[in-house]
Amino acid sequence: MPIIYYKDSIKKSVKDDLFTTIAKQYVGQFKVDKQGKEINSAQIRKFYQEALTIESKINEADDKDQEYHMQKPYINMIKAKAEYARSRKHVGDKFVSFIEENLIDTVDDYRDYGVFCDLFESIIAYYGK
């Protein structure tokens, strides 16, 4: 189920616990797959790096909204890559669900995408602990 990033419907203020409590919950889900095997953090960092590359292109553009829409197919491709990684047993079902629910279902514009990348950064930070 997708999470709500913001405190209000006008997307003015990010939820206080998004980068702490919620990020830690995702880490707990990703760390161990259903067979009890720990998921390799390098795989998750690879997806994070791809998300950052796209975010960088958006942030460098004069018209961020237009650039977001130009990058949207590549953002969607992250889902396909996550499903492929799952088929190779590099990531688990919970990670793929995170990508589907929070990147594909929740992100509607470049501001949402930036919050998604910040959430992903928090997850990476907690994953390394």
Image (spheres, grey):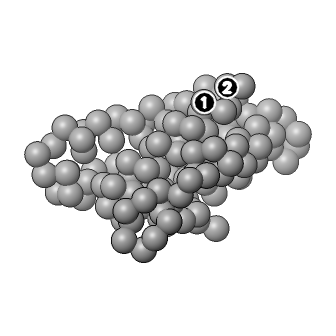
In the image, taking residue 76 as reference, residue 17 lies left or right, namely: right
Question: 49 or 18: which is nearer to us?
Answer: 18
Question: 43 or 7: which is nearer to us?
Answer: 7
Question: 44 or 107: which is nearer to us?
Answer: 107
Q: CA distance from mark 1 to mark 2?
A: 6 Å
Quarter of image, res 88 = top right
Q: In the image, what residue type sits under mark 2?
A: Gly
Return the residue found at the far bottom.
9
From the image, which quarter does the N terminus lie in? Answer: bottom right
Residue at 60% x, 30% y: name it.
125
Q: Does dot 1 land on a helix, a strand or a loop?
A: helix
Percent across and percent down for residue 83 are 59, 50
Residue at 39% x, 57% y: name it.
112
In the image, taking residue 17 as reference, residue 12 lies left or right, namely: left
Percent across and percent down for residue 105 are 49, 66
Q: In the image, what residue type sits under mark 1?
A: Ala
Give neighbour class at mark 2: few <14, some 14-19, many 20+ (Cα, 10 Å): few
User: Residue 125 shows which numbered tag?
Assistant: 1
Residue 66 can be seen, yes or no:
yes
Circle 1/circle 2 CB separation < 8 Å: yes
User: Residue 63 shows which numbered tag?
Assistant: none
Give neighbour class at mark 1: few <14, some 14-19, many 20+ (Cα, 10 Å): few
From the image, which quarter does the C terminus lie in? Answer: top right
Q: Label 2: which residue?
A: 128
Residue 30 can be seen, yes or no:
no
Return the residue found at the far left.
62
Percent across and percent down for residue 10 are 36, 71
In the image, taking residue 26 as reference, residue 2 lies left or right, namely: left
Residue at 65% x, 51% y: name it.
22
Residue at 32% x, 61% y: name it.
109
